[in-house]
Amino acid sequence: MSNHVVTRAVLGVGGQAGRGRTVELGALTVVAGLAVLAATRPGSHGGQPAAVLIDLSRTVGYAGVTLFIGTVVFWLLIWPSGHRERGLILLAWLGLILTTLSAGAGLVSTLVVDVDALLDRPAASLLARLLLVAAAVPWLARYVTDRAATHSSGVLLVLALALTVVTARPGALPLPTIALTELHVLAAACWVGGLAALAVAVVPRRDPSVLHATLGGFSWLSMSCVATLAITGILHALLRAGGLQPLIESEYGAALLAKLLAVGGMLTAATGSHTYVRRLGSQAAPVQVIGLFIGAELALGAAAIVLTAALASAPV
């Protein structure tokens, strides 16, 4: 079947495509609204599933959301022409699969304990996440075929998925905490997910021109993410613990310190990469050297994701 036929089958023709995008945007708005409403619901008061299962499911979910958000942002901001790159497409689909598995497992484990908790957090946030994944599937199928299709829907998906991570825990969530954590999640996903995109789709090509075209933009994006993570992370931790002294004396503070060490290692590698790229100027960056920087950042980023999952359940 020709690419033209496939494109028409996926995107639709003329007014049908336009109406499809309108319906999709409306559906995404509704699901994003569910995620917002989840933030106003109380946490479930039922019993808790096994802590190990919760942490595992949460880690898989963070990884999935990070891969999808990071890949979409990489497409939109760094490498728009790479929307048909097989490695990036597989990475985005993997993110959706991991997100679905995690949200489904978390939702089932929560409802087994308390079937009436469907509209309470974290079940409501997990349900919203599953609905967002269902909306992301047709959007992704269209996007990888036509780069100009529904960018606004992609942005809304990114923002709403990050919000489901923010609201997927019981307890009070004041507006400042929601805003800070949303920015924190987005920055982390753009940084770590973007690194995965570089590692999977750009570095293996061993094409200096493609590497040079993408690395400069991502270098600045990663440094912006670092600044956002530092500011939002400190403020969020102080708000959650109720001050510096309670933070230092709590288990949450100890888990946060471990995460900060991992992020500090990522920052060291990112700074080295950023400095190296700046010194090269217009010269093409050696693939092997950049691969080392990216590999170090990605390994530490994976550790940070696991520690973030532990932070969510650490007592303050």
Image (spheres, rainbow, N blue to C red):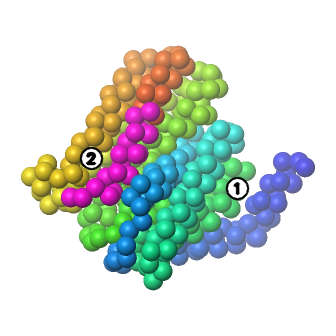
Give percent across and percent down for residue 250.
17, 53
Task: Answer left or right for 164 relative to 80.
Answer: left
N-term mark: 2 or 1: 1
Q: Quadrant of residue 39?
A: bottom left
Give percent across and percent down for residue 41.
36, 78
Q: Please report the residue visible at 14 percent of the width from the left and 48 percent of the height from the top.
A: 248
Q: Please report the residue visible at 49 percent of the width from the left and 74 percent of the height from the top.
A: 112
The C terminus lies in quadrant: bottom left
Identity, as a three-letter code, of the amino acid under mark 1: Ala
Q: In the rendered structure, which segment of residues is drawn in magenta?
A: 299-316
Labels 2, 1: front one: 2
Q: Residues within 10 Å of mark 1 (few under 14, many from 20)?
A: some
Q: Tag 2's secondary structure?
A: helix
Q: Nearer the viewer, residue 97 or 31?
A: 97
One can see residue 59 in this view = yes
Q: Please report the residue visible at 49 percent of the width from the left and 75 percent of the height from the top.
A: 111
Q: Tag 1's secondary structure?
A: helix
Give percent across and percent down for residue 172.
27, 71
Magenta span: predominant SS is helix
7 up-or-down from 229: above or below: below
Q: Nearer the viewer, residue 60 or 206?
A: 60
Reading the image, the residue beneath label 1 is 141
Image disc number at residue 256: none
Give the farthest residue toward the bottom: 116
Image disc number at residue 255: 2
Identity, as a three-letter code, of the amino acid under mark 2: Ala
